[in-house]
Image (cartoon, rainbow, N blue to C red):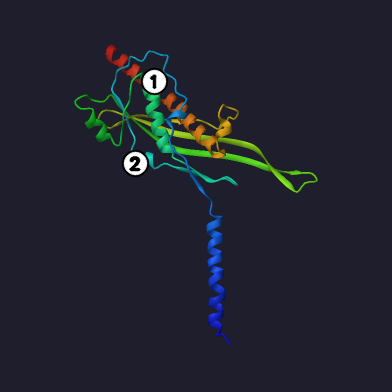
Amino acid sequence: MIPRIDVLRFVAGPMLAFGALLVAGCATPVHEARLDPGLFLRSPSSADTTVNAPIALVADAALAQFRYGHESRGLPTLVIPVGTIVEAATVAALSDEFGRSVMSYPSVDAATEANRPVALFAMIVPRPVRFEIHEESFPLWIPFFPVVVPITTREDLRLIVDWQVLDSEGKPLWTKRYDSGDVKLIFGRPGDRDLKPEDFFVRLAHEVAYTLMREAARDVRHWIEAERLRERVL
């Protein structure tokens, strides 16, 4: 007669191993999205870009670490590097708005030191405060067929970014919040057939980030122009 404890080991061992395989097999795959500057819908400024005030972008570790994970039924978990996209979108937007290259630095001190002996007129610090993907659907039963088809009723995303403008010593001058609102996914573009479902949100994240940062860059240019005009008046 086999001792009871040996029977338990004989039965429990394979069961635990089988359970581990099930868990591993059911683990949701992850799709790590990457920055793709080619997805920015860039457009050079048509306005006068003769404002030559030296400016720089400060992109600290907190910005780079801002990421967003989205789960969708039947698809890999989508992880979007929101902070990295916002940083690149800000550099592109400032460069396009001012008509020249704008550099990014990891800290205020690094930006100040790199531009000596020239004193920076302003340093821009973008800070994403919210990023959301919204997906809503309802199940549609097909009569006479054991099939349920999900009907999508909402697919959009929203990005909110705080922009802080600092002076040459790193002191805050002004802060403004930029909100994209809910921006819907767009389908039917050339090349859409080659995209995976999760890639549509990645593309939209790039487009929304650039559009929003371009608005912010335009505000900075208008502010600098007003400051320079005020200096001449004084």
Q: Quarter-wise, where is residue 104 in the image?
A: top left
Name which residue lies at 39% across and 20% down. Answer: 97
> What's the CA distance linking mark 2 and mark 1?
25 Å
> In this view of the protein, can residue 198 be seen by the observer?
yes
Disc 1 target residue = 97
Name which residue lies at 47% across and 26% down. Answer: 211
Q: From the viewer's perspective, is residue 107 above or below residue 148?
A: above
Amino acid type at mark 2: Ala
Check the image and name the residue furthest to the left: 117
Please provide percent x and percent y for residue 57: 33, 30
Mark 2, Cα crowd under 10 Å, few <14 / some 14-19 / many 20+, is: few
Which residue occupies the foreground of this view, 181 or 155?
155
Please provide percent x and percent y for residue 230: 31, 15
Number of marks present in the image shown: 2
Q: Quarter-wise, where is residue 121 in the image?
A: top left
Q: Is residue 34 left or right of residue 5?
A: left
> In this view of the protein, can residue 185 be seen by the observer?
no
Mark 2 vs 1, N-terminal side: 2
Which residue occupies the foreground of this view, 61 or 72?
72
Q: From the viewer's perspective, is residue 132 above or below residue 213?
A: below
Please provide percent x and percent y for residue 110: 25, 34
Disc 2 target residue = 61
Which image quadrant: the C terminus?
Answer: top left
Name which residue lies at 23% across and 25% down. Answer: 119
